[in-house]
Amino acid sequence: MERYRPQFHFTAKKNWLNDPNGCVFYDGEYHLFFQRNPKGNEWGNMTWGHAVSKDLVRWNHLPDAIAPYGGGDIFSGTAVVDQGNTSGLGKGSLKPIIAFFTHTTQPSVQAMAYSNDRGRTWNLYEGGKAVVPNQGLDICERDPKVFRHEPSGKWVMALWVKNDILRFFTSDDLKNWDHASDFEAPGFYECPDIFEARVDNNPNDRRWVAYDAGFNYWIGSFDGKSFKAQTGPFRGDVGNNFYAAQTWNNTPCRIIQIAWMRGGIYPGMPFNQQMSFPCELTLCATSSGVRLRRLPVKEIEALYDKTFTWKDEAIEPGKNILREISGELFDIELTIEPGGCSEFGLMLHDCVISWREGKLSCMGVTADLPDVAGKVELRALVDRTTIEIFGNRGAVSMSNCFLPKELSTGLELYVKTGGALIHSMTVHILRSAFEKGETSP
């Protein structure tokens, strides 16, 4: 048994994994490429691993997509569906998928590959030559994010070229690129992403969001050439293990994000590192201004096995309403009125999620989470080595990995000093995402 293998978070079958790459939806499949070392459990020999899913929960591993060549590794990048065959690389009825990546020659350049069979096989464009040369700002300029900007009829590439500088390029055909502008922001560092979203789902109020590997994000406008920040930076996730997140291209009705949960520990396992669970991003108006919200995709419901619910139940110190529940995998939702209690929280898998005086804490991380109209909302996804917490409908996101000391399956909801009222609580015990009989993906 692979004791520390996550059961509904993506992992490589074996060896090292880091940044998600090339996230794109096409022909009913979500493609997830990822940085992978095919030769060992430590970072190195960077190659694009590949998996596909129809529901963002169960993944089918495919052969590695793009391998090192010409003395350089294949670093992070993105993928798009060339719907109009603007590249001229499409053949037959299927639309070509075009992948852009950093080729780590000295200095690095940006290159591309294409597929005409739904991403099953890949060809380097013109043998892997650079489509965007090194800009002379950093020896390893990297991580191209490419997307279609329909109002201008152009393709856009956002590229990290130097600390604090995100450079934009435009193209008509995905092969020839022109420098359009630079966005300068203190602290902006690698793995850029940028997307447009509605505020409170209002089609007349749209904003653009740009963020870096640490999920520091800025909100502003984008005209097809330049991004102008109006507010930010803000922190999109405050946990210990969230990095290099990427949103899927070609999902017009949803903004879906996945991240590398950097730094997890999995002793004795044939794999190393994991991804976060996919989440949907939205923009919401708040008393402090427009902010991102982040919540698990609804497809997690496919894993619900047993469900327990409570409504309008008073709790007090020493009363644990969860004492009869046990399991390894959970999706827990709680709306509570703290009332007179000084602290409340959840204890599970050797970990504590606590709320005290408007602060949410877990595994050494603390974030502001004030009550809203006297209530606090918490949601927690719990896997074998992972707890992802979402506070007040995604206003706070906190992603943490942990190493349990022993197989602990109990749950406890506690309060200290006085009582509290559970407005509503739901505990879903989850099934593994693996097929029956599988112990690994």
Image (cartoon, grey):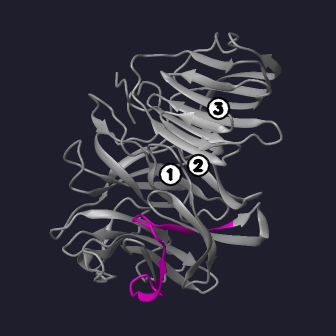
Residue 343 versus residue 203: which sits nearer the camera? 343
Nearer the N terminus, badge 2 or badge 3? 2
Q: Mark 2 points at which residue?
A: 279
Task: Report the amino acid beneath label 1.
Answer: Ile
- 36 lies above or below 197: above
Q: Where is residue 206 in the image (x, y as percent from the top left)?
A: 71, 71
Q: Is residue 388 left or right of residue 220?
A: left
Task: Report the amino acid beneath label 3.
Answer: Trp
Q: Position of residue 39 (x, y in %)?
A: 19, 47
Q: Mark 3 points at which residue?
A: 355
Labels 3, 1: front one: 3
Spatial CA span between label 3 and label 1: 26 Å
Q: Name the residue under label 1.
A: 258
Please tell me how crowded label 1 is: few (under 14), some (14-19), or many (20+) other residues with Cα within 10 Å: many
- Residue sitting at x 26%, y 28%: 268
Tell whether label 1 touches label 2 (CB within 8 Å). Answer: yes
Q: In this view, does 301 lie to the left or right of 123?
A: right
Q: Where is residue 374 in the image (x, y as percent from the top left)?
A: 81, 36
- Residue sitting at x 41%, y 61%: 119
- The span picked out in magenta is 169-197
Spatial CA span between label 2 and label 1: 7 Å
